[in-house]
Image (cartoon, grey):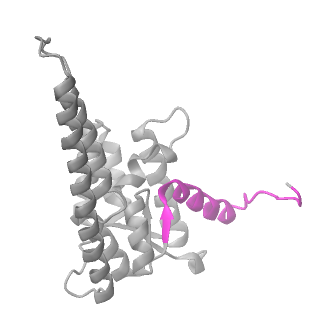
Amino acid sequence: MEGSALKQRFVLDTSLFITEKIREDDEDVEAAAIALLDDIAEARLEFGISCYMPPSIERELITMLEAREVSDEVYKKLNTWVITKSPAHYEVMIPAGMVYEFIDEMSERVNRGLRVSEKAVRKAEKQRENEEPEEQPDDYLSAVDRVISDLRDEYRNALRQGVLDSREDFDLLILARELDAGVVTEDRGIIKWAEDFGLRYLEGRDFPPLLREYLAVSHGRYPDHSPGE
């Protein structure tokens, strides 16, 4: 097979297909997904580059695509060119030190979440005291309601941002470790853990250009780069 030296494996995250970073100016999710899957198909045939996805990620992606009412063509290409494989949960080993660090980090995040909650309670109590006890319309958002809304955002950031917080994320990393594959994602939490796992990773926005660069070389379309350009 031509270009066999470039043969690689990648495990794809949901965020790769959903992010606006892979879209051209006038593209929607469906058009961008079809273009990406066409590139994956061509790279598979030209170089033997294989793309995988654990079943949990596939289910998550399909749910998101269904919500966006994409055509059947997307699902057909996805089933054809992206390999669904369950990770070997009982065979892939994880260093105890990483588990220890994860427990330590989650403990700190819980404490951070408690501090955010305490701050919100004090703020809500103060605002309730200052609020006039007059009748309000049904769609009125009280000061306490606003505090609760802010609390949800801050609490989510304190506990979930940048951390491995779902089975889907874990499956992605375990499968990549099992296959010695690169992780493709826009999720900063997954990227952080990919680094800790010692895995290769690529931001989703950089994946289509990577495939197209390989294909351009194969087709003799590699552009000239003169010095200083």
* Residue at 21% from the left image edge and 41% from the top image edge: 122
Whole-percent x and y of residue 208? 54, 55
Q: Position of residue 154 (x, y in %)?
A: 30, 47
Range of magenta residues: 201-228
Q: Quadrant of residue 88?
A: bottom left
Quarter holding the C terminus is bottom right
| Nearer to me, 82 or 115 | 115
Image check: 227 left or right of 99? right
Please identify the quadrant where the N terminus is shown.
Answer: bottom right
Task: Identify the residue at horizontal 24%, vertical 38% (top origin).
Answer: 123
- Snapshot quadrant of residue 91: bottom left
Q: Residue shown at 48%/66% (left/top)?
A: 44
Q: Please give left or right for residue 134 compared with residue 168 in the image.
A: left
Q: In x, y percent, where is residue 8?
A: 50, 75
**Residue plotted at (44% across, 53% down):** 37
Residue toward you, 65 or 104: 104
Is residue 209 in the magenta section?
yes
